[in-house]
Image (cartoon, rainbow, N blue to C red):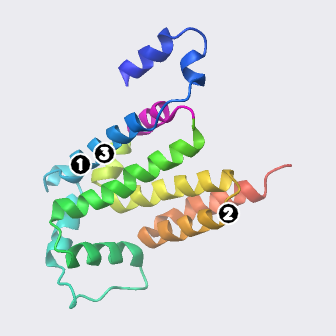
């Protein structure tokens, strides 16, 4: 973050801000973060990681029934990972890939010329690591809402609605930001 900040501060005028940067550098950074956060140890220091790991280990594919009345998409992801015989760390890596790469996708839509600066804002936020390792489902769902907002601001309403429904199927707590977003977007002063 400091290196990039100093690059922008030291640039003449707005030369770096206006220059189209390739997506490869932030993508590599995000892949490193996905692997690092996904293959974290199962330890109480990471909060709910222990609970998610215990539930995943207890799951028996074909015998354990999914609860379709709750966060059924999260349950489907979990059952699918278990059916593929993935380790707990691989399961967490799948969740981290959704969490981090959906944020990068949204950043690329919001800041098309400068995705590196945008992803640095996201990963340096106070709760980024905490949502990624403790509130795994909540973090994933919230980043999907972030992506849904990016779709909506491009007037792509169908992908936005589908992404919101997927996020709601992962963690129901996103109902509040979805309601706030819909209210703010459709009932704004024109």
Helix, strand or loop status at disc 1:
helix
Q: Earlier in the sequence, mark 3 or mark 2?
A: 3
Q: Is residue 46 left or right of residue 20?
A: left
Which residue corresponds to the image point at 54% horizontal and 19% vertical from the top-left? 16
Q: Is residue 20 magenta?
A: no
Residue 117 vs 75, above or below: the answer is above
Look at mark 1 in the image and give the residue it sits on. 35
Residue 48 makes an appearance in the image: no
Measured Cα–Cα span from mark 3 to mark 1: 6 Å
Labelled pair 2, 1 in contact (Cβ < 8 Å):
no
Q: Is residue 12 left or right of residue 129?
A: right
Labelled pair 3, 1 in contact (Cβ < 8 Å):
yes
Q: Is residue 123 magenta?
A: yes
Q: Quadrant of residue 186?
A: bottom right
Measured Cα–Cα span from mark 3 to mark 2: 28 Å
Residue 101 makes an appearance in the image: yes
As drawn, the label of residue 157 is 2
Crowding at label 2, few (<14), some or many (≥20) Cα neighbours within 10 Å? some
Q: Earlier in the sequence, mark 2 or mark 1?
A: 1
Q: Could you tell me what secondary structure mostly forms the magenta stretch?
A: helix
Q: Is residue 181 left or right of residue 140?
A: right
Measured Cα–Cα span from mark 2 to mark 1: 32 Å
Look at mark 3 in the image and give the residue it sits on. 31
Q: Position of residue 160 (x, y in %)?
A: 61, 62
Crowding at label 1, few (<14), some or many (≥20) Cα neighbours within 10 Å? some
Q: Which residues are magenta?
A: 113-124
Q: Position of residue 64 (x, y in %)?
A: 23, 87
Helix, strand or loop status at disc 3:
helix
Which residue corresponds to the image point at 42% horizontal and 14% vertical from the top-left? 6
Which residue corresponds to the image point at 63% horizontal and 63% vertical from the top-left? 179
């Amino acid at each position: 973050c400091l290196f990039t900040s100093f690059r922008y501060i030291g640039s003449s005028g707005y030369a770096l801000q206006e220059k189209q940067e390739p997506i490869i550098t932030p993508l590599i950074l995000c892949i490193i973060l996905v692997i690092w956060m996904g293959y974290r140890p199962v330890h109480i220091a990471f909060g709910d990681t222990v609970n998610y790991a215990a539930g995943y280990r207890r799951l028996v594919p074909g015998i354990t029934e999914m609860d379709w009345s709750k966060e059924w998409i999260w349950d489907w992801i979990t059952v699918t990972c278990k059916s593929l015989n993935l380790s707990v760390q691989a399961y967490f890596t799948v969740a981290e890939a959704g969490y981090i790469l959906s944020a990068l996708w949204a950043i690329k839509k919001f800041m098309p010329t400068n995705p590196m600066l945008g992803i640095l804002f996201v990963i340096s936020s106070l709760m980024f690591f905490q949502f990624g390792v403790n509130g795994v489902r909540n973090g994933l769902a919230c980043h999907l809402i972030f992506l849904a907002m990016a779709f909506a601001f491009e007037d792509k309403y169908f992908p936005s609605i589908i992404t919101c429904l997927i996020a709601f199927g992962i963690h129901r707590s996103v109902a509040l930001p979805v309601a706030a977003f819909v209210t703010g977007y459709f009932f704004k002063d024109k």
